[in-house]
Image (spheres, coloured by chain):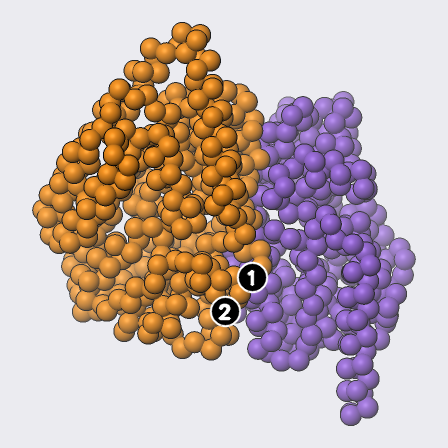
Chain colours: A orange, B purple
Amino acid sequence: MKLSFPHMGNTEILLKDLFRRTGIEVVVPPPTSEKTLKLGVKCAPEFACLPLKATIGNFIEALEAGADTLVMAGGVGPCRFGYYAEIQRRILQDLGYQFEMIVLEPPRADWLGFFKTCRRLAPGKSVRQIVKIIKTSFSKARALDFVEKKVLRERAYELVPHSTTKAYKEGIALLDRADTPEEIEEAKNKAFELIDWVEKDLSREPLRVGIVGEFYMLLEPFFNFDMEEWLGRAGVSLERAVYLSDWISVSKENQVTGFSHHQVQEAAEPYLAYFVGGEGQPTIGNSVHYARAGFDGAIQLFPFTCMPDTIAKSILPKLSKDLDFPVISFVIDEQTGKAGVITRLEAFLDLLEAKRKSKKRRGEGAELRELSVQGLRLGAQ
Amino acid sequence: MLKIGIPRGLIYYDYHPLWKTFLEELGAEVVVSPPTTKAILRQGVKAAESEFCLPVKLYYGHALSLRGMVDKLFIPRVVSVEKRAYTCPKLLGLPDMIRAVDDAPPIWSPVIDFTKGKRQFYSSVYEVGKTLTNDSLSIFRAYLKAVNEYKRFQARLKAGIPRHQAIESQLSQRSDGKSEGPLRIGLVGHDYIISDSYVTMNLSQRLEKLGASLLTADTVPRRIINREASTLPKSLFWTYEKDIIGAAFHWLKKGLADGIIYVLAFACGPDSLIQTLLEYEAKKMGKMPLMSIVIDEHSGEAGLITRIEAFVEMLMRAKKRSLVEA
């Protein structure tokens, strides 16, 4: 069996780790590129969302590279994502590829099915071994996310451009190599240290912005135009509402974002009182959290025709007005260009700066300084 | 007397007789927004997020057209009407979406969620009744009457009466007479699209004029729809799409239609996938032609007419040929 999977940010590291442990050969598709997208757009439904198009592109490239088994995540709705594997199977079969598709359905929907899938993906392993493997790989995913969270917060303070990114890449490489739980823990601490050693100007008072929206767009730098790095270098300290390990975690209490699922729902309640699938409710709930925590603004990213986040977008203006909290939405599809996105971002940041200045004039400066120091201290934890 | 406004869109086409009877029995006055007009469409397109599908934009228009005329808008949150399936994310968020519009009328939004069992449904019905009267017995009576009315509505649909007529009148026959053309065309799509003649630009009437008799998913028994939909390797988790797939598969497999027309709205989430699924299966199963018509607020009449004329002509030619060969 030669197994392959679609790309999404750091997912590659996690899956490579997982399948190395279960003893399955993996074919990593080439990184998502213009070519990948073109392949996907050509054969995907016209107004399906970008994640479907991009992952089909990944699969085509993986099959061309010799993969014979594809792994895709499933779901039980109401977001379309849960049905993507079925659609992809048909499209790829229609193109004449020979392959097998393994769909990872969420365990809480069907325990037995999940167990059977695990057996196929971990041939010859006992249940106990499988549980141990999942636990270890998951702890690696957690570690990756915490390192990323720290980088997002602290990049705005760096003195030498790209030095944080460099430290981050070194840290990720350390984690990638780590094997046992002890090694993972050690690599995580080392990665934290590396980032702490980056030269920083702690007297800065960077803008603090939250990033919310659909998980694929947030996690895949190719589609968000490396927005996080650009913002960090423009002097913005970031907080993100979506992390890979939160998304796959069974428990919804202990999240990397710092807010449990329950807290997010509660915060969203006055604006969106019910789940609408995908990240619809979390987008609203996390925006409320950021507004309450004194952030300067929030950025929402989602693919064109995404149902849950379009609902959130239609509600955000009301939230923004009620809480006096600027929010900008980017709707991304295969036509979106980087220049347009950056221009809008620049204008948004100007607006946030101006708003902060006027706040300072009104004597709320001391409070802001306090928040910014707090932010850094939290990041160091 | 409480004046309750019901926008003529989305769920209206599925459950209106039920709610209207229930609310009126309990002494409320029900006001329905007028049939779709250009002004309503324009208002909706202006108020709604541009990424929404046309039916949702229209719903905004209908809801806002009732502004100032009613005490409350009745927009239930229809999460799910059967086990293991949702309606559509946009219906889940509908009351919150309309509430976020500036100066929207007050909104009344009971939750209908069958994923949480029948008890949740009964307790929502009871709560709706409770706001209108304190008498539990009359709530129960109104509920029974509403359910009966809804069953009669379903029977009218089964008898082949178009939805918009079945909602508005008690007639057990089509008011404009059933057309018996030589061609049988299956028409599938969300009820709220194909029943709104403004949106489809009178598609049904046009097809009938061209000599087609129409089959709709309403006339296919539920049992068959469920059976056909369950032939998919992974069961669908959207109710509307189950109906579309179930009916279309039934016609495809039994050869009951000469062709199928599938009307869908641009940017509709589930439909984007169902289109691929249906086209793929139709291609695999054989010879029945399938045409997808994608509609949005910019769709023009001329383009539609050309396409359906060409489609009907093609079906006619195929039918003649098959008759000659036989």
Image disc number at residue B279? none
Secondary structure type for disc 2: helix
Question: Taking B134 as reference, is A225 above or below it?
Answer: below
Q: Which of the chains bears the disc numbered 1?
A: A
Question: Taking A30 as reference, is A231 above or below it?
Answer: above
Q: Is residue B29 left or right of residue A335?
A: right
Whichever of callouts 1 and 2 sits on the residue coming sooner in the sequence is: 1
Q: Specify the quadrant of the image occupied by residue A151.
A: top left
Q: Is residue B196 left or right of residue A101?
A: right
For the residue pair A347 and B199, the one nearer the viewer reads as A347
Quadrant where the C terminus of chain B lies? bottom right
> Can see residue B229?
no
Q: How many numbered marks are there?
A: 2
Question: Residue A320: percent from the left, percent from the top?
Answer: 52, 25
Q: Specify the quadrant of the image occupied by residue A28.
A: bottom left
For the residue pair B21 and A131, the one nearer the viewer reads as A131
Question: Residue B24: percent from the left, percent from the top?
Answer: 75, 33
The residue under label 1 is A45
> Can see residue B9?
yes
Tell me if mark 2 has few (under 14), some (14-19) or many (20+) residues whose alpha carbon lies within 10 angstroms of its own: some
Q: Which of the chains bears the disc numbered 2?
A: A
Question: Taking A220 as reference, is A238 above or below it?
Answer: above
Image point (42%, 68%), residue name: A60
Distance, label 1 to label 2, CA atoms, is: 9 Å
Image point (65%, 74%), residue name: B252
Identify the amino acid type marked 2.
Answer: Ile
Q: Is residue A81 left or right of residue A261?
A: right
The residue under label 2 is A91
Identify the amino acid type marked 1.
Answer: Pro
Quadrant where the N terminus of chain B lies? top right
